[in-house]
């Protein structure tokens, strides 16, 4: 497996609370991504980063923010969690014009 | 906008039988195409990719896929399925930009293998 660590792996949180998911890579890849996976939808891109402090929105970015202060770390924050954000979240990394490598995922349940 | 369609949500095949998983894409330029596999509770593993050149690409675990531009398809095949191939399979099209690579995924096909 590519050197990608997601934490936590599982989390249950209450509606309205903030939640931060962390992705850490040891591959020194330039690009990092956050996807969410929901049945019937495959994976959908939330946000991505093309360098330290350089981020952009994906197709399902509402309600999420990200930060990348170091090459190796990419944080995904749900400012105020809602039940619709219950999902499995995957971090991925890539180099330019190449395939993406995925972490093991974080299962988030918002109750 | 790019899109990927995997027409089959579930497929069941007998162990030892051949397999074909369908994937159709919509993309305005030369596509970069991928197949990933996901076992339960795991992340996604790359099976194979097509960037250019030979339209028949070989991947890991005995899988292959054929790119057909005229049909906008990138179907995954395996001549003889093993029980360990039971998993969910995702086709994706890549949009490579200056500031990142965006992958658009299909909804996935769940493969069941019966003995």
Image (cartoon, helix red, strand yellow):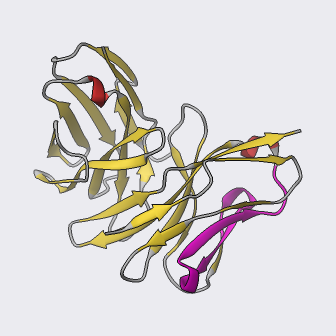
Choose between A52 and A67: the one closer to the eye.
A67
Could you say where residue A5 lies in the image, as x and y percent from the top left?
Answer: 38, 35
Choose between A59 and A24: the one closer to the eye.
A59
Check residue B59 for magenta coloring. yes
Residue at figure coordinates x 42%, y 38% from the top left = A38
A6 left or right, relative to A17: right
Residue at figure coordinates x 32%, y 71% from the top left = B96
User: Height in image: B24 above or below A26?
Assistant: below
Choose between B94 and A99: the one closer to the eye.
B94
Residue at figure coordinates x 37%, y 83% from the top left = B29
A97 left or right, relative to A19: right
Q: Which image quadrant: the C terminus of chain B? A: top right
Could you say where residue A31 lies in the image, as x and y percent from the top left?
Answer: 28, 57
Say whether residue A98 is visible. Answer: no
Could you say where residue B67 lies in the image, as x and y percent from the top left?
Answer: 59, 78
Check residue B54 for magenta coloring. no
Quarter assignment of residue A8: top left
User: Height in image: A10 above or below B8?
Assistant: above
Range covered by the magenta-colored residues: B58-81
The extreme front residue here reads B7
């Amino acid at each position: 497996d590519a050197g990608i660590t997601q934490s936590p792996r599982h989390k249950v949180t209450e509606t309205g609370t903030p939640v931060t998911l962390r992705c850490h890579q040891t591959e020194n890849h330039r690009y990092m991504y956050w996807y969410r996976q929901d049945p019937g939808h495959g994976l959908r891109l939330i946000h991505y980063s093309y360098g330290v402090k350089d981020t952009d929105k994906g197709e399902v970015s509402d309600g999420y923010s990200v930060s990348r202060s170091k090459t190796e770390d990419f944080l995904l924050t749900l400012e105020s969690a809602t039940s619709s954000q219950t999902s499995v979240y995957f971090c991925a990394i890539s180099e330019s014009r190449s395939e993406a490598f995925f972490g093991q995922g974080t299962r988030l349940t918002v109750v | 906008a790019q899109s990927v369609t995997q027409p089959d949500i579930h497929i069941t095949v007998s162990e030892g039988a051949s397999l074909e998983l369908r994937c159709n894409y919509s993309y305005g330029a030369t596509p970069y195409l991928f197949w990933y596999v996901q076992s339960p509770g795991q992340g996604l593993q790359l099976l194979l990719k097509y960037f250019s050149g030979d339209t028949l690409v070989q991947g890991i675990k005995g899988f292959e896929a054929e790119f057909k531009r005229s049909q906008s398809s990138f179907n995954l095949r395996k001549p003889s399925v093993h029980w360990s191939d039971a998993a969910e399979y995702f086709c994706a099209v890549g949009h490579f930009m200056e500031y990142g690579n965006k992958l658009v995924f299909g909804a996935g096909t769940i493969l069941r293998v019966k003995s």
